[in-house]
């Protein structure tokens, strides 16, 4: 096509290609979800429907965005790991982050009624996104450990806070003061001795977040000749397991290979 005299404006665009050979992580976070969650009646401290909706959106991203090898979600955030060799959009940062972010946001609205059939959306939710390059598998693992540790710390705090308020009848301000300066051991003890709650027995999805990975599954099919058979297929699997220790990675050597 002939170029117009206006074509030169293209040169004002900045090169934002992400470093080659690095793992790419795109992290999304809900904008103003403190307000969004209370306005839409999320159960505190953990609304299972909201977590499952986010997982559904992340699965949509995994299936649609090529080279997404793993995703980790907790609270109102999701991190997507793209293969270190990905050539998606020539590794241009803005193309990658905006595509992942808008796909996730659109899915959030599309699937909302499936997870919140009784609760109409009051306004369009939005998410921010950033991309970070991690040069080694060790640092990528440390990144994911950081997010899972964050999930744990926040969840332990929020569980104590809302138990004091909901079951202890304590005003929110007082619950906040009660927890100020306490360590993990104190919080576990508070839950157990005052409310008979064993933190370790709470649902794993709340304590560990959700990790999505590609796994081969066998699905029963009927062959054209009418026989039953098993067909191998790749599917996105949701896990609520520890990803800080070695076991998870040891069991899936292909992930960081
Ligand atoms: P920002 O726009 O800066 O991200 P924010 O209000 O979204 O602000 P975050 O630090 O991201 O703040 O925290 C998200 C908040 O959303 C949590 O504090 C919690 O109150 C709420 N939230 C997110 N997911 C859930 C959930 N599944 N169940 C209950 N509450 C949730
Ligand atoms: P890419 O993902 O690279 O942007 P694309 O298919 O979106 O690929 P574009 O160059 O952005 O390609 O072109 C958008 C295309 O969408 C147009 O070629 C046209 O076919 C279609 N399209 C967009 N808006 C309209 C519209 N209002 N009416 C009809 N067709 C439209
Ligand atoms: Mg934020
Ligand atoms: Mg947020
Ligand atoms: Mg957040
Ligand atoms: Mg287009």
Image (cartoon, rainbow, N blue to C red):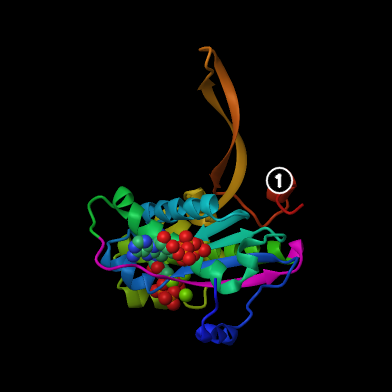
Q: Residues within 10 Å of mark 1 (few under 14, many from 20)?
A: few
* Figure disc tally: 1
User: Is 119 a magenta residue?
Assistant: no
Left or right: 35 in relation to 242 = left
Give the residue displayed 62% in from the left and 61% down from the top: 88
Q: Which residues are magenta?
A: 121-138
Residue 27 vs residue 179, the one in the foreground: 27
Left or right: 200 in relation to 216 = left
User: Is 136 a magenta residue?
Assistant: yes
| Mark 1 CB lies closer than 8 A to ligand 1 | no
* Residue 108 image offset from top left, x and y in percent: 38, 58
Give the residue displayed 49% in from the left and 50% down from the top: 59
* Residue 150 image offset from top left, x and y in percent: 56, 67
From this viewpoint, is residue 178 visible? no
Give the residue displayed 43% in from the left and 56% down from the top: 54
Q: Locate the N terminus and report the quarter of the image it occupies.
A: bottom right
Q: Quadrant of residue 159?
A: bottom left
Label 1: element kind: loop
Reply above or below: 53 against 21: above
Give the residue displayed 39% in from the left and 60% down from the top: 106
Q: Quadrant of residue 214?
A: top right
Residue 10 vs residue 147, the one in the foreground: 10
Q: Which residue reaches farthest front? A: 2
Q: Which residue is mark 1?
A: 252
Left or right: 25 in relation to 139 = left
* Residue 13 image offset from top left, x and y in percent: 57, 83
């Amino acid at each position: 096509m002939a170029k117009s005299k206006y074509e030169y404006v293209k040169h004002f665009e900045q090169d934002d290609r992400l470093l080659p050979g690095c793992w790419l992580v795109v992290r999304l976070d809900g904008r103003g979800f403190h307000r969004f969650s209370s306005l839409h009646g999320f159960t505190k401290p953990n609304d299972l429907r909201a977590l499952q909706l986010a997982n559904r959106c992340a699965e949509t991203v995994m299936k649609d965005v090529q080279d997404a090898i793993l995703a980790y979600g907790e609270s109102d955030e999701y991190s997507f790991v793209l293969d270190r060799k990905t050539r998606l959009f020539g590794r241009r940062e803005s193309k990658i982050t905006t595509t992942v972010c808008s796909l996730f946001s659109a899915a959030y609205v599309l699937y909302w009624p499936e997870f919140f059939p009784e609760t109409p959306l009051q306004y369009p939710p939005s998410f921010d996104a950033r991309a970070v390059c991690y040069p080694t598998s060790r640092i990528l693992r440390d990144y994911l450990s950081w997010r899972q540790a964050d999930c744990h710390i926040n969840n332990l705090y929020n569980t104590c806070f809302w138990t004091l308020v909901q079951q202890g009848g304590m005003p929110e301000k007082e619950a906040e003061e009660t927890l100020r300066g306490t360590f993990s051991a104190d919080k576990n003890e508070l839950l157990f001795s005052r409310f008979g709650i064993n933190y370790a027995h709470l649902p794993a999805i709340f304590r560990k977040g959700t990790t999505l990975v590609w796994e081969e599954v066998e699905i029963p099919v009927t062959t054209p000749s009418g026989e039953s058979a098993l067909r191998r297929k790749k599917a996105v699997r949701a896990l609520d397991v520890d990803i800080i220790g070695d076991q998870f990675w040891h069991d899936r050597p292909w992930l960081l290979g």
